[in-house]
Amino acid sequence: MSDAGHITQLLQQWSGGDEAALDALSPMVYEELHRLARRAFSGEKASHTLQPTALVNEAFLKLVNVDVSWQDRAHFFGLAARMMRRLLINHANARTAKKRGGKEAINITLDESSVAGDDNDLRLLEIDAAITKLAEIDERKAQIVELKYFGGLTGRELAAVTGLSTTTLGRELKLTMAWLKAELGS
Amino acid sequence: MDLKALESAYEKALAMSDAERREYLTQLASTDRGLADEVGKLLRNATLDDAVLSEPIKASAEALSDAVDDPWVGRELGAYRVVRRIAVGGMGAVFLAERSDAQFEQRVAIKVMAAQLLSPDAIERFKTERQLLANLQHPYIAQLLDGGTTEEGLPYLIMEYVDGLPIDAHCDAHALSVVERLTLFMKAVQAVDFAHRNLIVHRDIKPSNILVTADGSPKLLDFGIAKLVAPEDAATRSDLTQPGRRMLTLDYASPEQVRAERVTTATDVYSLGVLLYRLLTGQSPYAPTAGGAASMESQILEAQPDRPSSRITSEHTTDADIVKTRSTTLGRLRRRLSGDLDNIVLMALRKEPERRYSSASAMMDDIHRYLRLQPVIARADTWWYRGQKFVRRNALPVAFGISAFVMLGGFAAYTSVQNQRIAAERDVANTVSSFLIDTFDAARPEVVQGETVTAEQVLDASDARIAEQLADQPRIQARLSRVMGDAYISLGVLDSGIASLERAVELGKSGSMSDYDLAVAASSLGNAYSVRGDFDKADEILAFAQELIYPLRDRGPYAYAKHRVRYGNHLETRGKPAESLEMLLDAAELGSRLEQDPDGMYPDVLHNLGVTYLVQGNLKEAETFFNKALATNHPIWGEGRKERAITTGLLGRVLQQSERYEEALGYVEQTRDILANVYGPDHQILGPAYGDLARIYAGLDRFPEAEAAIQKALDINRARLGDDHYNVAITYSAMGTLQAQQGRFEKALSLAEQSLAIKRKTFADDHPGMAITHSKIGDFSRELGDYDKALEHLNAALRIQRAASGDDNIRVANYLIGRAKVHQAMANTDAAFADAELGLEIHAAQSPPRRRALALREVTQIAIDAGQCDRAAGFLQRALDEWQQSAASEPDWSDDMRTRSQQCEAKGGA
């Protein structure tokens, strides 16, 4: 079976409630995002504004048969957004750890010579912590944020994936944004 | 923190004016200081600016990219700058690069040879070969653009950049059928053959070297590159087989490559065989073993590969994708491969190079023969084999063949008559005949180079030639135009067909046709206009044909009868059922007396009579005539034929309208399958069948299937006929009914009104086809409580239907009961019962017991609503009695109605 076929099947199993399929799926999506990141970002920095959105979409096209149901598609984007978040956080962690001279630093085989400002990494880690805190209070709101900022989903896609109306989403997002900004500012 | 409380307080505050908000917050602070602080914090952050979140995330994504450090990226090679690494393989690395002078945008792939592969003379050999490769220009071969040597002395090649999927992945991703796979494969073989003619052997044919671009064309990569880096001397043998250093994929390597013997064009033929094996079965010819490369080698040298078809079993393919990605079933795929395709693949895979196909083109020819259902050379040429092939070929003129057989067949019959009649016509006939032969010659696979040719394309090509080459031979042009026109129309390509027939008629009117031929052409044209919905034009040309052909009816009773059928059909569409019936009964009389009926005119007339009765709502007569048509056993109405399929489908419609859904479903599904098989799944001819299926499914309470079917009907009808065709109108109307059955009356009403608006564009206001739409608008309006509108439309429905069919008609009865419901809803009980009783009377005379029972059930409900409980009980008893005549068991609504009847409370009567 082709990769896309295999992954699509896992996705369908997961949608059908098989959590083991998620365990198999997560590392595959993570790896693909990682691979795409390395590939897409190398050398094209000058000409492209890089967005996690593009990566997640590319991963979808790469990994999943395009004719999957909306439900499976939604599941995939949910998962991909989570993996994208994890990927970026892992890298931010790795870089800050390296800066601190720690040895725990993570399984990253890339050359770390040119690292973006660690200020940014710290800010990202703060955002991550804030979203985690939000998830403890209101899981749904946290998921929406994840989908929007790490998955790059916009209005109608968000509605399709979460099953919420765009008006509900708009209201939720406004509140969530205010809450997160307040949290990050404090 | 309680987010719910915070949320509602925040929402509340957000909706307030500034002053209100300050007051609200102050008040809140006095009761819950913490909450007030939180709300205040949220309000201060209530802006849409999300840079705090999005910027760090974006920046960290970019930081990820900074972590990549490829020393090749940014390097300049020739006129190109390396953008990124695409792949690393045994032979070196491949990079994507762009023109560094940025004069124009050009992306290329650059292959840099791995340093360890270079031998002292490698660079010299490289240069010689490069020149050969540069000359290899073919649409299916990635072009070698340039080459050079890096500062470090590594040779590189600059090639056309191909953005595509490996051929096997492409086939699976698009679920290509076996025929589509073969067609694509042949394009690749064509490229290989081209290279062979230029004395270049590929040496490393495998899926990853054949990419298929978005437009479906294959591009072969890396021609001859294996030779550049791996000259065939014994010293390189170890490179070939050593794990880790192997440059050639052993999966596709030939025995001679494993032995490091001389590589020839036959080597590529072998690899093509492996590739075809994989494309067809999804598997390698040799079983994967635990023994690794050595075991694989010994298999390549010694093992006889299984026949591809023998691998299509559940034992070999636990992978369910194998059939799904080939758009077929396991059994069908196995049968498909079994025989010729097995032999073709195994011939390419023979161990001895000299016993394989002698060339790539020989292999290609054999696949062509297979696709044309001709004997292939990969099999012993025994007499029974030829016979078997011949039968299949003639029994199944599929794909591009269908029009060839239909047209040539029809034409042969036609010319035989003509030639007997007038000797001078023979030259014309011969020219026409050779023209047609040329036409189909042009469609031979060799000529079109593996493209799939549809009948429509063949016709288009001929159509252009008729206009160009025969301008000075109007008689031939006229006749060919007529033949072409009929062929187009039989394919459902109305516009082109009409254009051809118009040309024929025009030429005929200026003297290039006999009156008889002109009349036949005009009759065809009139029929086509009528089908397209150009009714005025159809009126005119059919009347013209009638005038012309009537004096000639003895010369061609068949053509005359056929014309009468067409005219009759048109009149029926036009809403003149009486004239239509007369025309058709007349034609049926003629038809029953025909001595020869090659085209099945008689069953055709019977069929059309069935249609006319069906349109009038005379289901009993319609059923009779459809059954008569099927019972003629005329070969054209034989099993698997389009004509039989359509008659069967309409019989299904009669049964559906008689509410015999289970029976109807069998007939209509059969029709859908046969038509889809002959015409393709999206042909306009399938539109009505899907409409019927939707109604049947709805009748069986299978609504999701009904919705899917009706959507398919709409897609088909709109794509082929445009938005304003009456078939589209009928589809909207059916969609409305479907919505209503699910209780969505507003949607239903709007669809029915849409239908009426379209019908008004093509039908006169009193056309019988308008009645049903009016009645639906009436019913839906009543459900929505708009009684005036309901009455208006039901009155219109009744007026139109009565004018078309007289009073004693089931539809009249239905509309009367529909109107009775409106009257009752308006508390006009007397009028309600008047309509209801009249409707029941008509049903009693015209309808089968089941239909009568259902009508009585509706009237029972009217009586209950009117508070006339005794009457209601009486109607219900009659309904159940009627039902008993048609069914063994009680209807599923009997308990419900009994309860309602018992709970009925008298309202004092009328």
Image: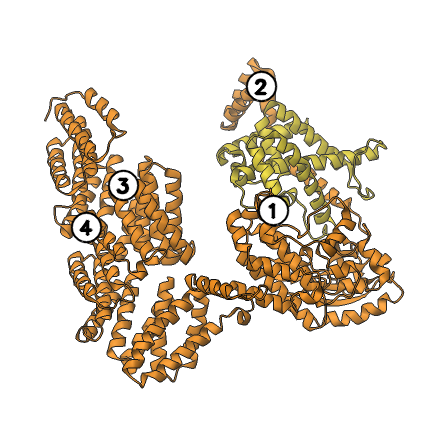
Residues marked 2 and 3, same chain: yes
Q: Is residue B85 visible?
A: no
Alpha-carbon distance for marks 2 and 4?
Answer: 74 Å
Same-chain status of marks 4 and 1 = no
- Give chain B's shade: orange
Quarter of the view holding residue B218: bottom right
Q: Colour of chain A?
A: yellow
Horizontal side of residue B557 vs B300, given as left or right: left
**Along the line of sight, the residue nearer the viewer: A103 or A27:** A27
Three-letter code for the amino acid on which mark 1 is drawn? Leu
Nearest to viewer (mark 4 / mark 1): 4
Q: Which residue is mark 2?
A: B2
**Seen from this angle, which residue lies furthest top?**
B31
Q: Which residue lies under the disc numbered 1?
A: A61
Amino acid found under the numbered disc labelled 2: Asp
x, y percentage for residue B580? 18, 60
| B625 lies above or below B422 | above
Please give the name of the residue rendered at 28% of the width and 83% of the height, measured from the top-left corner. Answer: B422
